Image (spheres, rainbow, N blue to C red):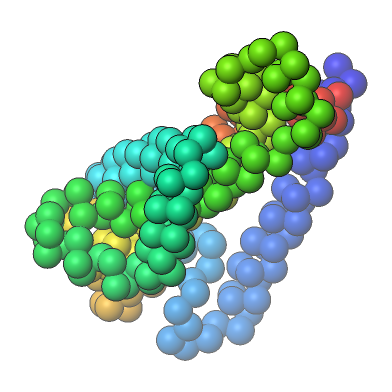
Amino acid sequence: MNGLRRRLSASLPPVAFGLVGLALWESVLRLTDPRGFVLPPPSEIVAAFVENWSQIWTGTRLTGYVIVTGLAAGVVLGVIGALLVTRFRSANETITPVATAVNAIPIVALAPVFNAWFGLISPRSNQAVVIILVFFPVFINVTKGLTQVQPSQIELMRSYAAKERTITREVRIPNAMPFFFNSLKIVSSLSVIAAIVAEYFGGRQDSLGPMIIQSAGLTRYDDAWAAVFASAMIGIALYALAALAERLVMPWHASVREATT
């Protein structure tokens, strides 16, 4: 009961801040009534969201599929890459420079190239953009977690003649779990950004990205912000799932114990 009360009290300030911000947003725009302003009041955004629910739901499913599949593939590849560079020196000398170089390429340069490779309306091109953007944060964080292990722990395992795979399973992977979940919470938002930006250059025209562009181009800013709100909800849901998975997988970690007590 005390833990529940603490969690409720901890969530009260951000909820109150958000409600006050929405009230101020609505009040200022209602009172000033600026002409041609691209940010409509929250009430108009909610009304547009309800009015265009069928189109927004279709776009959310299409964009959500790209986000979730690209996120899953990027996370898996990032973890595999981290395990390889930690275990093999040749992999470290090969994968790390390539990953750094690819991560430096902006999305606006990658999206047209992938559209030419996989097709303009194929979801694979947008999935590839999401994978590229997700891979690097997971790869770097998990690699850091796998390598930043106390030397005494490694020496103790080797004193028992433990093999390298046993050391990785029993010492390195548990040490890397907090780093992994931190990166997972970061890329849950990055994957949404990557998918929406990639959809500006190709993909289904009834997904969220084209919906935002078309509505904004026709000055229907309430419809555009309703689609933005739907994409934000996808990011929030993915972040919440990552935080929940962190609590379920590693309840032994100090940060999780402090949050639940």
Q: Residue 78 or 162: which is nearer the viewer?
A: 162
Q: Residue 97 or 42: which is nearer the viewer?
A: 97
- Is 128 on the left or on the right of 230, as rendered? left
Q: Residue 184 or 48: which is nearer the viewer?
A: 184
Residue 258 visible in the shown view: yes
The quadrant the N terminus occupies is top right
> Looking at the image, which residue is at 25% across and 45% down?
62
The quadrant the C terminus occupies is top right
- Is 95 on the left or on the right of 137, as rendered? left
Within the image, what quadrant is residue 153 found in? top right
Task: Find residue 4 and report its horizontal and vertical position in percent.
Answer: 81, 24
> Looking at the image, which residue is at 57% across and 23% down?
164
Task: Find residue 45 and report its horizontal and vertical position in percent.
Answer: 45, 61
In this picture, is 220 found above or below 115? below
Within the image, what quadrant is residue 102 found in? bottom left
Residue 226 visible in the shown view: no
Task: Find residue 238 and report its horizontal and vertical position in percent.
Answer: 50, 40
In this picture, is 69 found above or below 235? above
> Looking at the image, which residue is at 78% across and 20% down?
156
